[in-house]
Image (spheres, rainbow, N blue to C red):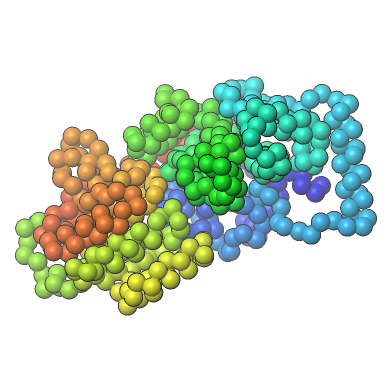
């Protein structure tokens, strides 16, 4: 493979290497099977619940070496695991003969481009960057794959496009900054569209973004249908990342520095528009779009998803029998007088806002006794995890707030009185449904589907009553007040937990979710 030309691809040792068409190729971005979390757990459960179909998994990673060993054991009917990367692993610049060969290659490529037709891929990139509507012609331009990474990085046609974009979109920004950011945005796109399409009867991407881009391109290239499922809304979550990004230097209010607010600068707007464009490509090509809630459906439509393609299929869990979930007016047991057992369950990453969770627990402990556990992996963002641990130490709560790492669901909820989520963004958290299945109430921020999961999503559902407490994002005092109330009112906890269990039984059963996808797969693989 030429340097920078296309995306690296490998089959994981032990996976079957045949090239027979699979029924479903699942496309994921930086999650399954290497990273724990709700989306990975959902993907694993989806595969496990459809043993009659032959799956392959196509994982889009950042760069080689960015993941450790798989966190999930692939099911026997997953017979292929593809791995591609958005960028090459950092390496020393070529020197000597290697550098001379690369320079000759670049000169030859640039001469060929000047003597030929304009690149269709670069024309499509221009339209995406300018925010033009996605249509079949634009998608076909990307699929043409007529521009290598080396040509893009060094060709005069690319430089001319950047100069045009600088004048139209960022006249006051540093041209050099725009030059490097534009390359950073679109090199992953070029590498990924150069990937070989897996053989499959249908493609199912578990997000938009880069996985959705691959799904759209592979669908066009093979003529096979594409399903898009979104848990969190990709464009919204990437905009939140951009708002906190300190790697975009810009001028704000006449002072050069880092901006942590909404993306106000041309460079941030160009990044934001690129992520929205990736979502639009997947929406345009998809035969079906599956979302988890009406809240997310409205956001997808606002981002350009055709309403007629969208179906709402909630997540689901199994509900084991619980002999100890009784009437809401039952007398509290003696152990109700012990400290309230509070659990955060999830990845220790910024989007989960574990800092707010810690501060909320600290505030609540001024009034009530809490036994707090942070349950989930913390290796995904070690710097943030260290920040959270340091905060616990600074607050003097190391004995009351413990980081216990990931645990299987069956070992988590029976030892908790309340589950707390303080996330900046969510889709429809499986954590909430797992807690409900165990009769445990939830305190969660008003993001994604959390409010409808706690208060009900229709008249019949709302009649069950609330199954937790909704709080404002980034407000430790709200969460602390909820914890104090639940610690002091054991009957309320019992009533909320009972309502949550009834809500799962009525609206969020795993088998219903699996049946919905079974019907969808049956329709797609036979086209």
Which residue is outermost to the bottom?
399
Position of residue 168 relative to residue 264, above or below, is above
Seen from the viewer's position, the closer of residues 344 and 293 is 344
| Percent coordinates x, y for residue 229 in the rendering | 46, 39
Quarter where residue 440 is shown: bottom left
Q: Is residue 415 left or right of residue 131?
A: left
Quarter where residue 13 is shown: bottom right
**Residue shown at 42% from the left, 43% from the top:** 231
| Percent coordinates x, y for residue 163 in the rendering | 73, 31
Seen from the viewer's position, the closer of residues 480 and 127 is 480
Position of residue 126 relative to residue 206, above or below, is above
Answer whether residue 22 is visible to the viewer in this image: no
Answer whether residue 75 is visible to the viewer in this image: yes
Quarter where residue 110 is shown: top right
Q: How many numbered circles does the render carry?
A: 0
Position of residue 437 relative to residue 69, above or below, is above
Q: Is residue 496 left or right of residue 427?
A: left
**Residue shown at 54% from the left, 58% from the top:** 34
**Residue shown at 52% from the left, 41% from the top:** 253
**Residue shown at 22% from the left, 52% from the top:** 468
Q: Is residue 222 left or right of residue 117?
A: left
| Percent coordinates x, y for residue 358 in the rendering | 34, 64
| Percent coordinates x, y for residue 500 in the rendering | 21, 51
């Amino acid at each position: 493979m030429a340097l920078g030309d296309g995306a690296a691809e490998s089959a994981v040792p032990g996976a079957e290497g045949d090239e027979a068409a699979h029924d479903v190729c699942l496309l994921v971005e930086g999650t399954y099977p290497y990273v724990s979390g709700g989306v990975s757990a959902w993907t694993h459960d989806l595969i496990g619940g459809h043993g009659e179909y032959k799956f392959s998994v196509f994982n889009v990673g950042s760069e080689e070496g960015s993941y450790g060993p798989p966190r999930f054991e692939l099911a026997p009917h997953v017979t292929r695991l593809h791995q591609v990367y958005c960028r090459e692993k950092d390496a020393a610049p070529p020197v000597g003969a290697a550098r001379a060969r690369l320079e000759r290659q670049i000169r030859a490529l640039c001469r060929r481009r000047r003597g030929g037709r304009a690149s269709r891929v670069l024309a499509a990139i221009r339209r995406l960057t300018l925010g033009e509507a996605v249509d079949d012609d634009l998608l076909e331009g990307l699929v043409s794959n007529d521009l290598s990474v080396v040509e893009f990085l060094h060709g005069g046609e690319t430089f001319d496009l950047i100069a045009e974009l600088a004048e139209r979109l960022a006249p006051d920004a540093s041209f050099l900054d725009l030059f490097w950011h534009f390359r950073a945005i679109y090199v992953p796109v070029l590498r990924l569209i150069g990937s070989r399409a897996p053989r499959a009867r249908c493609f199912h991407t578990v997000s938009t973004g880069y996985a959705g881009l691959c799904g759209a391109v592979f669908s066009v290239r093979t003529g096979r249908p594409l399903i898009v499922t979104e848990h969190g809304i990709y464009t919204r979550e990437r905009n939140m990342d951009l708002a906190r990004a300190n790697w975009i230097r810009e001028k704000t209010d006449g002072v050069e520095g880092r901006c942590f607010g909404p993306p106000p600068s041309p460079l941030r707007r160009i990044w934001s528009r690129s992520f929205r464009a990736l979502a639009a490509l997947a929406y345009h090509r998809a035969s079906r779009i599956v979302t988890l809630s009406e809240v997310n459906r409205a956001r997808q439509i606002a981002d350009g998803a055709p309403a007629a393609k969208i179906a709402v299929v909630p997540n689901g869990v199994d509900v084991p029998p619980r002999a100890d979930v009784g009437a809401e007016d039952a007398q509290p047991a003696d152990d109700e007088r012990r400290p309230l057992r509070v659990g955060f369950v999830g990845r220790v990453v910024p989007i989960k806002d574990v800092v707010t969770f810690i501060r909320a627990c600290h505030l609540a402990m001024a009034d009530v006794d809490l036994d707090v556990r942070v349950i989930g992996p913390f290796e995904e963002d070690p710097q943030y995890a260290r920040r959270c641990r340091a905060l616990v130490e600074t607050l003097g709560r190391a004995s009351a707030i413990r980081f216990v790492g990931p645990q299987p669901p069956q070992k988590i909820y029976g030892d908790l009185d309340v589950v707390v989520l303080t996330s900046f963004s969510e889709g429809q958290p499986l954590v909430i449904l797992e807690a409900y299945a165990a009769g445990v109430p939830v305190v969660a921020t008003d993001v994604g589907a959390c409010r409808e999961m706690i208060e009900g999503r229709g008249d019949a559902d709302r009649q069950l009553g609330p199954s937790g407490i909704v709080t404002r994002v980034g407000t430790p005092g709200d969460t602390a007040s909820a914890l104090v109330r639940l610690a002091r009112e054991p009957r309320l906890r019992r009533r909320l937990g009972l309502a949550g269990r009834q809500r799962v039984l009525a609206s969020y059963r795993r088998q219903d979710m699996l049946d919905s996808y079974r019907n969808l797969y049956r329709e797609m693989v036979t086209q």
